[in-house]
Structure formats: C-alpha cells, structure tokens
Amino acid sequence: MARKSRNLNFDQALETLRAHSYQLAPYGDTGGTLISKGGVGAVLVAAPQGPAAFLVAPGALLQGEVARLLDRGYQKFIKISQFELPATAAQLHAIHQFGEELRLLIGATSLYNESLGTTSDVYRYDRLKGRETPQPAPARPWEAGPGH
C-alpha cells in the first residue's frame, strides 16, 4: 500500500503543531517560529521546498534559548551562549522524542541515523585536538640532506 504524502504549507504545519499541544512563539526578526514542548524547543522557518525547515535544530530550552548539543567523544553537553552543562539521559531522550515527533507532524524527512538516537550539532573530540596545525613533513633518510 502506498503511503500518503503530507504536503502541508508552513501555516498548516504550525496549526498542526498547535493542535498537538506545542507552544509557538515568534523568534526574533528572522521570521522563524520557536516551537517548544516539555522543556525542548526548535526554531522553524518557511522553506521554499516543503513546509518548514529547521533554523535551529531541536535542543533543550535553557533560559529561553535553544541549546546546542555538543559531543566531546566521551560525553554529550548542552551549550548555550552563557555556559555549557553535561547532558543527562532524560534530556537526550526528550530531545530525540521531540525531534522525531516534530518531523513526523510537519512532514519533514526523517533520516535513519537520526532515528537511532540523538545526534549532536557539534563534534569536538579531544583526541583530535592539535590536528588543525600543519605537521612538519617526516624525515626521508634515503634522501641526502644538509651536511652530507
């Protein structure tokens, strides 16, 4: 059986979200809308193709700001402009559930890796620290160098 495609425009998507108990508020002068529910939020804007696009990906709401999820390899952190905190399992679960439900309601594409668990916005592994600087070329003992 073929699936029904949901081609909602941006306003219809917002009405669907309101009907499912999401709180909606204008987001600055970007023309976006802050969507929140259960301490988690995201910012949606009207997209040229499709109903809506994420201006800010789903994240925990802290001090009225949608936090970014930062992965440091050994632990995930929730980061806003003033500070960053270690993410709890409950927060990660809430972010994942919020994102999945939001994508389903607005008709956005749900990717396989996103459905497996919470994906981070930024990856900063400490084992990669220092790789940004160019390393000197390794010595080539078979070539004649200075002093030979």
Image (cartoon, rainbow, N blue to C red):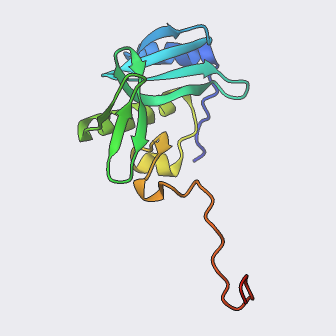
Q: Is 108 placed left or right of 34 in the picture?
A: right
Instruction: For the C terminus, give its image quadrant.
Output: bottom right
Q: Is residue 101 above or below residue 29?
A: below
State left or right for residue 115 relative to residue 93: right
Q: Position of residue 43 (x, y in %)?
A: 51, 21
- Closer to us: 20 or 148: 148
Name the residue rendered at 60%, 30% in the picture.
Answer: 6
One can see residue 39 in this view = yes
Quarter-of-image position of residue 51: top right
Rendered location of residue 108, percent (x, y): 57, 33
How many labels sit on residues?
A: 0
| Rendered view: 134 above or below 14 | below
Nearer to us in this view, 66 or 44: 66
Asked whether 68 or 114 is in front, the reply is 68
Residue 62 image-quadrant placement: top left
Residue 97 in view, yes or no? no
Q: Is residue 55 above or below residue 29?
A: below
Q: Is residue 49 left or right of residue 59?
A: right
Q: Residue at x 60, y 7 (%)?
A: 29
The residue lying at 45 percent from left, 30 percent from top is 58
Instruction: List x then y, in percent, for residue 116.
Output: 41, 51
Asked where in the image residue 147 lies, by quadrant, the reply is bottom right
Q: Residue furthest front?
A: 147
Residue 1 position within the rendered picture, expressed as x and y whole percent measured from the top left:
57, 47
